[in-house]
Amino acid sequence: MIELRAIKTENDYRAALSEIERLFDAEPNTPECDRLDVLTTLVEADEQGHYPIEAPDPIEAILYYLESRGLSNRDLEAAIGSESKVAEVLNRKQPLTLEMIRRLHNQLGIPAEVLIQPYTVEMYSAS
């Protein structure tokens, strides 16, 4: 059993992970479960400090949202516009507008802070 203390080194981090693994099936409302909660909090704080997770790309977030909820591109039409407009946005040919972002957030619950992240749009020109 490791001593509960701040994670300062890679060895501390690995020891905490090992202890978490050992305690993973701890019964609720036991000292082992309390220890698991504390260790998990310490590891999460360390990971956020050393390995921050960047906000996802807005288009990838929309696609993930659709897939994870069993929705189709058609379900985006109320927020984005016509079928062709949805295809242009998802294929990065047309950027999300502020109004689209508002509707995606309000109608589908996609976090606005994800949708406003910069991303690459491959603008095309009519020939």
Image: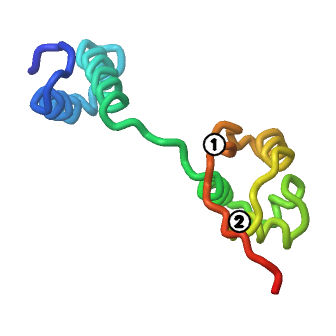
Foreground pick, 107 / 125: 125
| Figure quadrant of the N terminus | top left
114 lies left or right of 7? right
First in residue order: circle 2 vs circle 1: 2
Question: Mark 2 is on which residue type?
Answer: Leu
Quarter holding residue 103: top right
Position of residue 53 in the picture relative to residue 90 (left or right)? left
> 118 or 78: nearer the eye?
118
Quadrant (top left/top right/bottom left/bottom right) for the C terminus: bottom right
Write the residue at 63% across / 45% down. 117
Q: Where does the image place residue 77, in percent across and percent down from the top left?
A: 86, 61
Q: CA distance from mark 2 to mark 1?
A: 15 Å
Residue hosting label 1: 114
Can you name the residue that lies furthest to the bottom here? 127
Please say if the residues under marks 2 and 1 sit with CB atoms less than 8 Å apart.
no
Give residue 74's mark: none
Numbered-mark total: 2
Instruction: Decide if residue 21 is on the left or right side of residue 56.
Output: left
Could you say whether the residue bearing mark 1 is in a helix, strand or loop? helix
Q: Residues within 10 Å of mark 1 (few under 14, many from 20)?
A: some
Residue 36's x, y, as percent? 27, 22
81 above or below 33?
below
Q: Secondary structure at mark 2?
A: helix
Mark yes or no: residue 67 visible. no
Q: Write down the residue under mark 2.
A: 90
Q: Position of residue 63 (x, y in %)?
A: 64, 60
Q: Position of residue 69 (x, y in %)?
A: 67, 54
Answer yes or no: is residue 66 visible. yes
Q: Amino acid at mark 1?
A: Val
Q: Residue at x 71, y 38 (%)?
A: 112
Q: Is residue 34 above or below residue 101?
A: above
Depicted 84 relative to depicted 7: above or below: below
